Image (cartoon, rainbow, N blue to C red):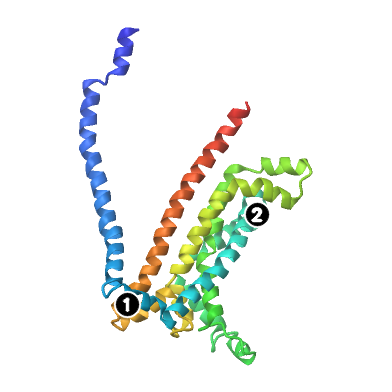
Amino acid sequence: MEAISIRIGRPSIAAKGRLTEIRPVRFVLIAGAVLFLGIFLVFPLIVVFVEALKKGVEFYFAAVSEPDAMAAIRLTLLAAGIAVPLNLIFGVAAAWAISKFQFSGKNLLITLIDLPFSVSPVISELIYVLLFGLHGWLGPWLAAHDIEIIFAVPGIVLATIFVTFPFVARELIPIMQSQGSEDEEAARVLGASGWQTFRRVTLPNIKWGLLYGVILCNARAMGEFGAVSVVSGHIRGMTNTIPLHAEILYNEYNSARAFAMASILTVLTVITLVLKTLIEGQSKIHGRRVAEAPSAKE
């Protein structure tokens, strides 16, 4: 027994050799990953803030508080404020239907949810222009009724909704499929209504995944450029979001103001990454608790 314990407790010479070989490889991989992140992530973030503050703090606050910049910020918040709640409702409903029920057309629904991931945002918004533009299929009727969609706020909201609606659904579908429907069935057997079952059983089980999807959806909504650019018309102070306003300023060689606007999106990106990391940690803790629950009951 003593010999066995000695062999188990002490690595062999061959094992030591393998560990010695692995350590340099591990160091090279870690150093390469850190160098890659430093060059392509950290360094650009530093450059954004350095360029934004190059002319001083007073110039920076003047750049982000001028009327056109404030209009771009308000429009960005408006588009995200409409798109995210709508995608939240759609995502929960679609994930519930796909994970809890069997119905014809289920695969088609999943394909439609993935459509914005496979179609270029520019191409998809050109279809909106073809439909709602002045010379489009519905353009003359909309113009006759004084309804503006393309080159107006409704078009920007539609574009934002289209490019962001998969995020919540795609985050919730695998979570709800892995959880099954036993808890919901037990709640219904005990007399709970559909709303009570969702509020007291389903929602607590998916809350961290739901928050994760909402954060990603909001980040994409505020940072979207291609789709919004097609339908906005680039009307300064009216249909420019933060990314579009930053592009216009940069094309006018007003780089300090452009980087000042870009810094706003950078701050939102950092906040998104921090919240994403925190929610991932909470989601893993919740997943471990759910996995350990059956063994605890036994």
- Quadrant of image for the C terminus: top right
Which residue occupies 61% across, 56% down?
Answer: 92
Where 244 sits versus 42, above or below? below
Quick check: 35 left or right of 102?
left
Q: Nearer the viewer, residue 107 or 141?
A: 141
Image x and y of residue 163, in percent = 50, 67
Where 249 sits versus 36, above or below? below
Where 241 sits versus 168, above or below? below
* Within-10-Å neighbours for mark 1: few <14, some 14–19, many 20+: some
Which residue occupies 31% across, 18% down?
Answer: 9
Which amino acid is tagged 2? Ala
Provide the secondary structure element on which disc 2 rests. helix
Cα distance in 3D space between marks 2 and 1: 52 Å
The dot on residue 59 is 1
- Quadrant of image for the N terminus: top left
Q: Nearer the viewer, residue 37 or 269?
A: 269
Q: Nearer the viewer, residue 297 or 174?
A: 297
Q: Badge 2 is on which residue? A: 97
Which callout, 2 or 1, points to the residue nearer the camera?
1
Q: Nearer the viewer, residue 122 or 10?
A: 10
